[in-house]
Amino acid sequence: QPYDPRAGGSAEYYRRACALQDAALELLRVGVADRISQTSAQVQDTLNLPRVPIAADKLEASLVYTRFHGISRRSNALLSVARERLDALGPGSVASSSYEDLMSLCRGAYCSAREALLTSTVRMHMDTLRERHGLVGMTRLASVFLIRLCNVETALYLDFFGDPSRRQQSRRRLSSGAVDADGNDDGQAAEDGPAMRRLGSQSASASRSALSDDPAFRDAEFQSCLGSLCSALHRTVRRGLVSVLDLDVLCQVVSVLREERAAANASPVTTAAARAVSGVIQDAQERLIFCANSSLHREVVKFRPGKGDLDYPGKLLPPGEKAAAAGAIVIDDGDGGEGTADEGEAKAPDGPTGDADAKPSQTTGGVDDAVAAQLKVYESWFPPMRSVLRILSKIFRVVEPRVFEDIALSAVQSCTKSLKDGSVQIYRSSGLVHADLFLVKHLLILREQLSPFDLQLRSVERQLDFTEAGRAVTRFLANRNRRLFSMSNENALVTLLREGVSVQESSVDSKRDLEDCLRSACNDFIEHTTASLLGPVFGLVERCKDSGPEALPSAPFMAATSVRDVLSSALGGLGEGLDGVRTQMRLYLESAATEGILLRPVVKKLTRAVEDVKKSVSEVPDGENGWDAGIRAEVNGIADEFVKVATRPRADK
């Protein structure tokens, strides 16, 4: 009953009640906390812990668990008395704090004892797994071990601090579920195996549910103990991650740990293991991001091409035809470099070969040839672009989307710049057409290979602008009445910072920049091709446009023989020039659709230039500058032949 100081003899009664309560609490402490500490010390002396860790396969059968199971029943009975008394007193009672302190003391003694017994064994097992199975195999096996450890430790903890009535209800529910599953047997022998497997799975799930029914396992002290034990995984894996440089290994580690984290999150009992695995995943992702950025900086930003890297079109030719790198190059479609339907659809070596014409009787040698051809396509790509696509494809589903977007944005910018620089060097060694086709080819591939990632490639960059800092400092020093300690907007230091430093924002859109670069490369190719095929004719058209209507008939460049010679000379090399351009485009692009898209503006420019010449010729009267009906008909015939040759389809169609 509550203490009433006005009742007679109440003070003596209260003193004796407190003495009896202290004695009872002392007995409970000795019976639980001291017994746990003594048992832990005895087990450590017997097993020589922590100097000699226990083998993981013998852990559950060792004294670490058997001795504690032996004292759990009596300890739970004593703690049940304290728990019932605490519930009876209520949270607002003065005496309840003593029982709460006792429960906290017992939980602390238990957790300290379990950490002392298990820490060395868990760490030794982690180190052993790493030595035997490597970093990737160790992460999977260690995660499974920690999940099992959390289940076993939770069951033991509930034997000490759990509510026996809840455990009995959970066991009865589990037993009834097993009986129901067994009673549904139809007598069909063929279904016994699957039924038993389902029963085993249901039993394991029900066992985890039985543990989670008792909220005692959520005690902060116990969860801290499990977290300390599971931290051995973080300790071991982190030491291994520091020396790993292989992106494939890091990606495998993250993938494995994500699977194990999903398994650990399936039950609230194994939350501590899930938290430990999540910490390791963050460390592995940080290491992966660092290695990916280092590889991109080394292989893309700092890339210096060698002679073999710039061997275009030599890298696209079959081995027997590399000697004929320039001029009229004849390549059979079956021997071509990239076997893609569209230039941007070329895949890395581990992708599909796209050999739709393969015969059913194709042998292993044919498959090897297809793989070798696909490898040749991959090797023909410019090394920086190959590195960017390889690294992005590896880390796509392993790092967070925002991080991947940021890495991809900077990687695409660096790759585009590297392609432009490579095009300039190819222009010096192989010519203008090869430089243009090289840039168009790789930008098409880069755009198409980035499309599956569904990237925006946009960001806002902020930079501090100090251009006005000098003037602001001058005004600050010139102001004799400046207020340095004023707590207002008129403070001189605040004014100095506001006027001297500003933030400049700029929007970065790598996808738009890539499209602009591709469009510019295509336009350059069109302009350069038309100029190389019909340069003198374009010069004649420009002169005609610059001359006025009155001066055009008598201009020297409009002499009949001069115009005829210019058109005849250009017509003589037009067919061969167009065939050479088509051959080179087929070598780089391997796509009739892409070739048609690029050649169509070239043909339009050619026909328009010839039509402009015919229009200018029609403005010159007969008898002027050597023009008459015969030579005019001859020039018009040459112009019509221009159109026929320019619109002639590919000879290999």
Image: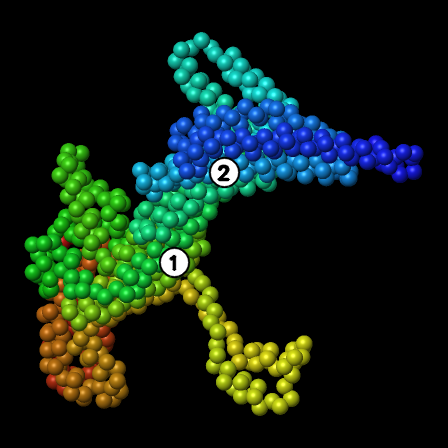
Q: Position of residue 311 (x, y in %)?
A: 15, 62
Say which of 376 and 482 sits in front. Answer: 482
Q: Residue at x 38, y 49 (%)?
A: 239
The amino acid type found where label 1 is placed reads Ile
**Is residue 329 found left or right of 604 in the rendered image?**
left
Q: Position of residue 59 (x, y in %)?
A: 43, 29
Residue 157 drawn above or below residue 616: above
Rendering quarter of residue 357: top left
Can you identify the residue that label 2 sits on?
Answer: 116
Q: Residue at x 14, y 35 (%)?
A: 363
Quarter holding the N terminus is top right
Q: Position of residue 187 (x, y in %)?
A: 45, 9
Q: Are marks 1 and 2 in contact (CB under 8 Å)?
A: no
Secondary structure beneath disc 1?
helix
Q: Point out the frontmost of discs 1 and 2.
A: 2
Rendering quarter of residue 308: bottom left
Say which of 247 and 560 sits in front. Answer: 247
Q: Residue at x 44, y 42 (%)?
A: 232
Can you identify the residue that label 1 sits on?
Answer: 407
Secondary structure beneath disc 2?
helix
Q: CA distance from mark 1 to mark 2?
A: 44 Å
